[in-house]
Image (cartoon, rainbow, N blue to C red):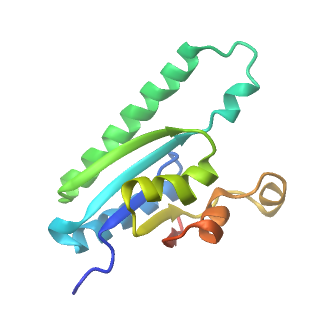
């Protein structure tokens, strides 16, 4: 069987939905064989820091360090499963735009594998769903994985 996708982007936020997406992305990367490239992404939403009165660089560093540890664990999981080409990225800013537009261009992704939203209808209405935005706005195919 020939894989249609070779450069797979999977955004991770630590939720069970994103972990299910990672499992599926690993399977797709394995299907692509040696040509499969898996890019694991975490976006640190800097807007969350704007509301913290005691915001300083050490807070960003602490969050970045924890994120890096998580991404190293996800990378090891993919390598252990047999994926040969795995990298990870940490980006800062708006998750919606970075996941849907900027990072797929940066890594030349041909597929985004993303976990289904954990938001209820009211939360989606008020704050919007990253998954929903990505499925509407991405220029590449998007696979939404249920947790």
Q: At 40% across and 38% down in the image, what residue appears?
A: 70
Residue 121 can be seen, yes or no: yes
Dividing the image into 4 quarters, which one contains the N terminus? bottom left
**Percent x, y for residue 135?**
60, 69
Up/down of 77 relative to 8, above or below: above
Residue 66 image position (x, y, % from top left)? 45, 29
Residue at image x 47%, y 28%?
Answer: 64
Please tell me how many numbered marks the rendered image carries: 0
The image quadrant of residue 50 is top right
Looking at this view, name the residue that lies furthest to the bottom. 1
Q: Nearer the viewer, residue 80 or 34?
A: 34
Q: Position of residue 126 (x, y in %)?
A: 84, 53
Q: Tell me: 65 left or right of 2.
A: right
Q: Is residue 53 above or below residue 131?
A: above
Q: Residue at x 31, y 58 (%)?
A: 38
Q: Is residue 142 above or below residue 64?
A: below
Report the residue at 49% width, 55% height from top: 18
Q: Residue 5 falls in which quadrant of the image?
A: bottom left
Q: Is residue 124 left or right of residue 81?
A: right
Q: Nearer the viewer, residue 10 or 82?
A: 10
Across and down, in percent, residue 57 comes to 56, 15
Q: Is residue 147 left or right of residue 55?
A: left
Q: Confirm whether residue 19 shows in the render.
A: no
Q: Quadrant of residue 27?
A: bottom left
């Amino acid at each position: 069987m020939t894989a249609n996708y070779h450069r797979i982007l999977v955004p991770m936020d630590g939720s069970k939905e994103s972990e299910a997406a990672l499992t599926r992305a690993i399977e797709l990367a394995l299907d692509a064989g040696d040509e499969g490239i898996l890019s694991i992404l975490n976006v640190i939403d800097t807007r969350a820091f704007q509301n913290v009165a005691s915001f300083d660089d050490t807070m960003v560093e602490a969050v970045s360090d924890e994120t890096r540890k998580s991404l190293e664990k996800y990378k090891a999981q993919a390598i252990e499963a047999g994926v040969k080409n795995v990298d990870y990225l940490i980006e800062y800013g708006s998750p919606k735009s970075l996941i849907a537009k900027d990072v797929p261009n940066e890594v030349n992704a041909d597929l985004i594998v993303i976990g289904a939203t954990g938001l209820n209808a009211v939360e989606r209405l008020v704050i919007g769903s990253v998954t929903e935005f990505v499925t509407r706005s991405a220029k590449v195919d998007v696979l939404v994985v249920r947790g």
